[in-house]
Amino acid sequence: MAALGDTSAPGVNGLIQQFTAITGATESVGKHMLEACNNNLEMAVTMFLDGGGIAEEPSTSSSSTASSSRAPPTDEVRAPIPQKQDILVEPEPLFGVPKRRRPARSIFDGFRDFQTETIRQEQELRNGATVDKKLSTLADLFRPPIELMHKGSFETAKDSGQLENKWLMINIQNVQDFACQCLNRDVWSNDAVKNIIREHFIFWQ
């Protein structure tokens, strides 16, 4: 067996060859073990066998290789939002006939029975008297006072007022305002109010 602590190149190579011949390990493992044991072959072999015949390679080269092979991190950038063009508000016509606006929908239109209202109005026009019906639906509760209303335009309402020598009562309502709907429910449906209007007024709504 070679001398202990022999650090010359031929001596180290000989120790490595002896280590590999005894243990069956690779030359790199032998070199590592000998360096750890200050080139003491006996101590290196004993340490190797006590460790189960497994020796780790130097970690410096492997770690440097791993760090060099690792790709540098890149910041993820979200793809740009696609461009979109749209018209928020339609332009008003500069000249010509303006667009006719749709009449505003009442908050109670969904409860109205237009067919029933038409039949009731036709009966009132034909009979000249109110149709006594029990209020059974929400639409009936908030319906306009058809039995009081003048059946015609504003001009015909004025003419009727002059002929009958009555005041002209105009009720302007905002169908989106609940307070206006309450007029139909609470005021115009009151019997005393109805009698006063029939006697002294032409009611136009």
Image (cartoon, helix red, strand yellow):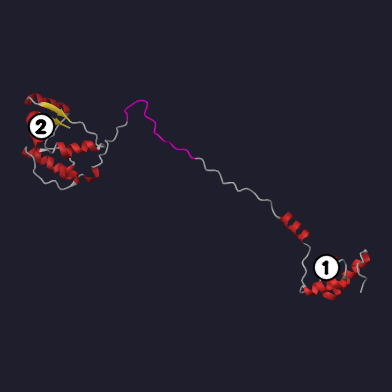
- Give the residues in magenta: 84-98
Q: From where the camera sits, is residue 139 visible? A: yes
Of the residues shown, which amino acid type is indicated by label 2? Answer: Ile
Looking at the magenta stretch, what is its main secondary structure? loop
Kind of residue sitting beneath label 1: Met
Give x and y (percent) for residue 143.
Answer: 17, 40
Q: Quadrant of the C terminus?
A: top left
> Label 1 near label 2: C-beta < 8 Å?
no
Q: Residue at x 9, y 41 (%)?
A: 123
Residue, x 15% and y 36% (percent of image)?
A: 187
* Location of residue 152 with respect to 185 vertically, above or below: above
Q: What residue lies at 17% left-to-right and 38% top-to-bottom?
A: 184
Q: Can residue 156 be seen in this view?
A: no
For this rendering, which residue is in front, 148 or 99? 148
Look at the picture and state if 62 lies above or below 167.
Answer: below
Give the residue drawn at x 51%, y 40%: 83
Circle 2 is placed at which residue position?
197
In the picture, the disc for residue 33 is 1
Dot placed on the residue nearer the N-terminal end, 2 or 1: 1
2 in the magenta segment: no
Left or right: 179 with respect to 78?
left
Compared to residue 40, the image places residue 175 above or below, namely above
